[in-house]
Image (tube, rainbow, N blue to C red):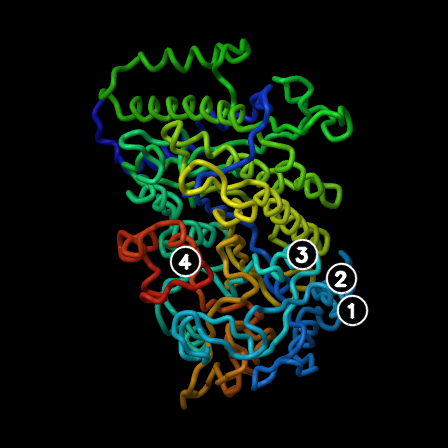
Amino acid sequence: MSNTFDRRDFMKTATTMAVAGGLPTFETLTRIAHAARPVTPSEVGNEYKAMVIVFLYGGQDHANIVIPYEDGNTAGTGGAGTFTEFTRYATDRSNNGEPASQSTSTGNLAHTRAQLAGTRLTTSAGTAPTTNFLTGTADPTAGGWTTNTYGRMFALNPNMTELHSLYNAGNLAIIANVGPMLSPITRDQWYRGTGGPRPLNLYSHDDQQKGWMSGTSGIANPNVGIGGRIAAHPVIRDLNRAGTIDSKISTQVSINGVNTFMLSEAGAPPGAIAYQMGTGALGRLTDPTTCNTNNPLTSNTSFPFCLSGGPVRISNGYSWNATLMNAAVARYAVTPEGVSIYHDQWRGIMRQSINTEQAISAAFLASPTTEDILTPFNDSDQVGGQTNWLSRQLRMVAAMIRASNQLGPTTTQPIKRQIFFVGIGGFDTHGREFWRDNPRLNQMISKAIFAFWQALGQIRVVNAAGTGLEPPSVTARSRVTLMTMSEFGRTLDSNGDGSDHGWGNFQFVLGGAVNGRNIFGQSHNVTTVPATTPIYMEVDNTAGAMPRIGLPPNPYSGTTRIANRLNHSLNRGELLPTTASDAMVATVAKWFGVPVSAMTGPTGVFPTLAAVHGSNWDMGFMQPT
């Protein structure tokens, strides 16, 4: 057969097969349990680092994530004792004055100020203007990234109590007003239709998801994602190799199905092709080889927890899989190598699937997922009577991190870099389901991420010499960075029932290497007001990195000059982003080990990043390591 089929298109398909259609995608779960021998301490290699992507599908409602609580003042000393901005928030979300009731019978989308008292945020920078991480200045209008909020106080969603505790403990940072961007844009340019290019099909779920995940928000159907580029980069690939021997598992692992973030380019090394796993099931170890998942939390309480899950077991002699295993192996010999690209790629994917399944099964047995790692997820498994699938996905991620010391290229070299993808949906809240779904989903996020953080604290780190463990205070928390993503924020105002599609949003970054208890972002503040009429911007030296909340004056009146200091807000209170999503991810990618020289440019990991932020893209929220 002629190999005239476009290789790029085929490799895109082949990559998707490896993620979604290969053997590991079956939900049949292997028996993976504690070994019948003493359990060694949980540990990861000294050079280990992992990125965990948490995608919130549907467009999370930004206005109820970080909420104004108390006004600041020009001096930035806080304690203003006024609530003008909160009143704007409450009024603009009230659906023409409906009372705040948080019930499915109202279109009022606001929380009350009393509900926010328990999730008020503090910043490590205090209340005074602080030095910018990059520019060395305290003036947010000078460019760069800042934690300065000029004394303004904010609160997290009241259903995010666990994330609130992580933030105030210094482990969590907030990225303000972030979204896919192709060029900087001001509110004035938005309404005039001037300025640089906008992302393709703004307010479209599919296109903005792809923009977040691909780093190319101007391309309709990207065939490679950010994770695919990172995993294929020679520096990252070499970290997961010993000579010519690759690690036993791909650098990329999805616990949430097919996604653009992990698509690999044509010709990518096998280690860059994403591998998909199931969420697993929690059980109790009723004998040395059986993980019993029947009523695991209420029966056999004298037995330890175990985790049954991952790839389908197709080897090791299990009779119910013999037919599948034999059929796969037999097909290898049907067509010789080099005759057809289809046969060659199918053969490679099948081999990778089988080899990976065997390696993970062996790793889970050699490095059992101990009870101290699994127990934190018990409290987050059910929320509001529904299964918290994000918790179960992160539980499997924790188990895989625990097993990483068995998945390297050799018995003496653990895997050093991993990228995980998890996700949860349901955030497209246009109707009266807003108060039914939004609080529960936010509680699921908060509880699942907190459980993951607790589990990471139980995983120790091998010392640099490889002869022992780092001190107990050094755990996998310092080696793992988690970040949230959602395709867009939503409108501040109510449509009568819920909120509609927007652009900018707030995101979270969690990790031991994160400069937590800080809010990072840029402002749309201007130092001078153009003389042209109408003007849709105003100088505001007290906003800092955080966008002003509220609905702007009618932009179509033709006479309005004053924007009420709402330089970040569009007509319905949608946030006009100042921070490209690529800048947030690139800051983590730099910590992960991607060279700065590989970040930008047409062939870089983030091809459009420089067009938005130039060389000043590092946001400074990651500690250098």
**Image point (66%, 41%), residue name:** 376
Secondary structure found at label 2: loop
**Image height check: is 405 above or below 524?**
above
Which disc, if any, is residue 624?
A: 4
Say whether marks 1 and 3 touch (CB < 8 Å).
no
Judging by the rendered image, the residue that carries numbered circle 1 is: 99
Q: Nearer the viewer, mark 4 or mark 3?
A: 4
- The type of residue carrying mark 1 is Pro
Labels 2 and 3: the sequence-earlier one: 2
Mark 2 → mark 4, Cα distance in angstroms: 48 Å
Secondary structure found at label 3: loop
Labels 4 and 3: the sequence-earlier one: 3
Say whether marks 2 and 1 touch (CB < 8 Å).
yes
**Image point (33%, 15%), residue name:** 332
Mark 2 → mark 3, Cα distance in angstroms: 22 Å
Please tell me in which quadrant of the rendered image residue 134 appears: bottom left
Judging by the rendered image, the residue that carries numbered circle 2 is: 106
Mark 4 → mark 3, Cα distance in angstroms: 29 Å
Classify the position of the N terminus by image quarter.
Answer: top left
- The type of residue carrying mark 2 is Thr
Mark 2 → mark 1, Cα distance in angstroms: 8 Å
**Front position in the image: 612 or 376:** 376
Judging by the rendered image, the residue that carries numbered circle 3 is: 160
Please tell me in which quadrant of the rendered image residue 601 appears: bottom left
Say whether marks 1 and 4 touch (CB < 8 Å).
no
Labels 1 and 4: the sequence-earlier one: 1
Indicate the position of residue 167 as horizontal and vertical percent values.
60, 60
